[in-house]
């Protein structure tokens, strides 16, 4: 009942309320991002959602477009400013995803939407993460974030899907609040760099076990 009917209704109502209440914050952040980091204000990227349907995820950008003499983008660590780190540490860069929730692409709670390029590398068990809408926050994100390896993070995603309930969602929201306001270092990592290793890790593992042609 909750999974099929109630959860989506709560997502819509709560995200709409959040957009209305936080609209001044969203406006101020948009102006600050434009002034400090440049245009465009939003970072957009395709991600797989429920049933692996591709949607466009929106965040506030946290890095500049600084390039070297050859016109190539500098490493993420050099483009991530103090302001960008603050946005990530407080998860304020995630606020535009409220509009993804309103549209129905995402949920407030669920497995985080990862890169499209990761799709071929999930196990059958891990593919369960795509049987629900991806979330603004999730069980894996409040269970160590970047301090647990990929296998453990994906295990947490599957654990969430198998035990999805109102009580589970309340638990994750409470843990998210404690994580953001009590352990901000856990969200200050360069998650893009961390995520970028997943396909390589799984590809290498498959090659070593002979399950992927070299």
Image (cartoon, rainbow, N blue to C red):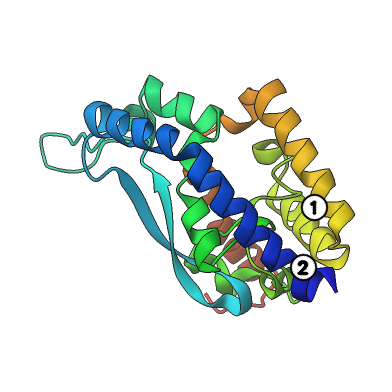
Is 6 in front, or is 30?
A: 6
94 lies above or below 15: above
**In front: mark 1 or mark 2?**
2
The image shows residue 111, relative to residue 190, as above or below, that is below
Q: Determine the CA span between mark 1 and mark 2.
A: 12 Å
Residue at position x 52%, y 74% in the image: 214
Q: Residue 63's spot in the image, x, y percent?
A: 33, 35
Q: Quadrant of residue 45?
A: bottom left
The secondary element bearing badge 1 is classed as: helix
Q: Residue at x 58, y 63 (%)?
A: 106
Give the residue at mark 1. Answer: 169
Give the secondary structure at mark 2.
helix
The location of residue 212, given as percent across then percent down, is 60, 77
- Determine contact: label 1, label 2, CB under 8 Å: no
Q: Nearer the viewer, residue 70 or 124?
A: 124
In the image, 210: left or right of 114?
right
**Crowding at mark 2 (Cα within 10 Å: few <14, some 14-19, many 20+):** few
Residue 35 seen in this snapshot: yes
User: How far across and how far down the image is residue 194, in percent?
Assistant: 54, 44
Q: Earlier in the sequence, mark 1 or mark 2?
A: 2
Is residue 118 rendered to the left or right of residue 154?
A: left
Residue 147, which numbered label? none
* Quadrant of residue 51 within the rendered picture: bottom right
**Residue displayed at 68% across by 67% down:** 8
The numbered disc on residue 6 is: 2
Residue 155: x %, y % from top left: 79, 57
**Residue 125 makes an appearance in the image:** no
């Amino acid at each position: 009942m909750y999974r099929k009917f109630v959860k989506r209704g709560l997502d819509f109502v709560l995200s709409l309320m959040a957009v209305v209440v936080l609209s001044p914050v969203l406006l101020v952040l948009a102006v600050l991002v434009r002034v400090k980091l440049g245009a465009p204000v939003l970072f957009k990227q395709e991600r797989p959602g429920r049933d692996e349907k591709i949607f466009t995820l929106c965040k506030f950008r946290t890095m500049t477009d600084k390039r070297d003499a050859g016109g190539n983008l500098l490493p993420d660590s050099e483009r991530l400013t103090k302001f960008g780190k603050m946005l990530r540490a407080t998860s304020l860069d995630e606020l535009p995803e409220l509009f993804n929730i309103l549209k129905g692409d995402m949920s407030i709670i669920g497995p985080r939407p990862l890169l499209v390029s990761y799709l071929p590398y999930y196990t059958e068990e891990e593919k369960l993460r795509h049987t629900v809408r991806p979330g603004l926050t999730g069980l894996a994100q409040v269970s160590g974030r970047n301090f647990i390896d990929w296998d453990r993070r994906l295990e947490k995603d599957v654990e969430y899907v198998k035990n999805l309930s109102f009580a589970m969602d309340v638990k994750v929201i409470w843990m998210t609040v404690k994580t953001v306001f009590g352990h901000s270092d856990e969200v200050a990592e360069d998650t893009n760099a961390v995520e970028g290793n997943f396909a390589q890790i799984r590809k290498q593992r498959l090659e070593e076990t002979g399950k992927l042609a070299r």
